[in-house]
Image (cartoon, rainbow, N blue to C red):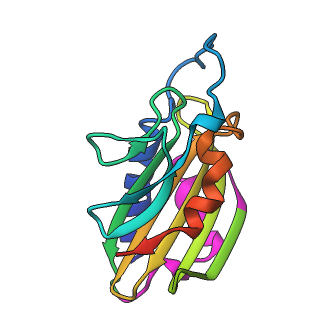
Amino acid sequence: MKKFFTLLMVLLLVFSIGLTGCGGEPVVDDEPEMDMDAVTMVQIDSDLGVSFLLPSDLELQDNLNYTNLETGENVGVVVSPVNGKSMTENSEEDILAVYQTKYEDVAVEDYQSNLDINGNLGLVVALSLTSPGGNPLILTLVVVTDGTNDYLVNYVYGADNLDGSLASNIDESITSITLI
């Protein structure tokens, strides 16, 4: 189960980091800052059985992630069958160990287990890490289970973009997660 969990977590992170500007030199953007008042929260009903709110500037991509291609903010959803142990039962150390094998400067910023997320058992873990390209990222992993499947919603944004639409609205998005 640990190998499966590790593989699933790495796969999800690879999908997410692939769109967060993780390679090469940081891009200097002379564009004016986005008007946060223009961003609204919109209801997303994914084909994977999860409904949640996301900022309107994140768009569905071909890889089924929701991404702002200008800022690199990214949200991905994965569903995994519960095979004896739900991922919501993983300890802080388990989560940390998975990410430390692939990324640098990994630290758990927040760990909340046994949460009730709209009537389902949930786990929320916020990590700071450095991408292979050297960019500091914040990754928030949310696992919600119905006992049969684990639903993973993975939020990734630059650690230097804490006032972006995703970082600014992440709590509202997490608390809106509903299994459909």
Residue 62 lies in quadrant = top left
The residue shown at (59%, 69%) is 175
Q: If the image is split into quadrants, where does the C terminus sit?
A: bottom left
Camera-side residue of 80 and 38:
38
In the image, 78 versus 100, the foreground residue is 78
Instruction: Tell me if residue 48 comes above or below residue 41 in the rendering.
Output: below
Identify the image quadrant of the N terminus.
bottom left
Which residue occupies the foreground of this view, 145 or 129?
145
178 over 35 or under it: above or below: below
The answer to whether 104 is drawn above or below residue 142 in the figure is above
Tell me how many marks there are: 0
**Is residue 97 at least partly visible in the picture?**
no
In the image, taking residue 9 as reference, residue 101 lies left or right, namely right
Residue in view at x 37 percent, y 68 percent: 50
**Where residue 51 sits: x, y (%)?**
40, 66
Question: What residue range appears in magenta?
Answer: 84-109
Residue visible at 66% across and 23% down?
33
Q: x, y (%) of residue 65?
A: 37, 47
Q: Is residue 79 left or right of residue 121?
A: left
Residue 98 horizontal/vertical position (percent): 52, 61
- In terms of depth relative to the viewer, which is nearer, 50 or 112? 50
Q: Position of residue 95 (x, y in %)?
A: 57, 66
**Is residue 91 something that shows in the picture?**
yes
- What residue is shown at x 50% (from left), y 29% (from top)? 21
In the current view of this chain or complex, which residue is farthest to the top? 30
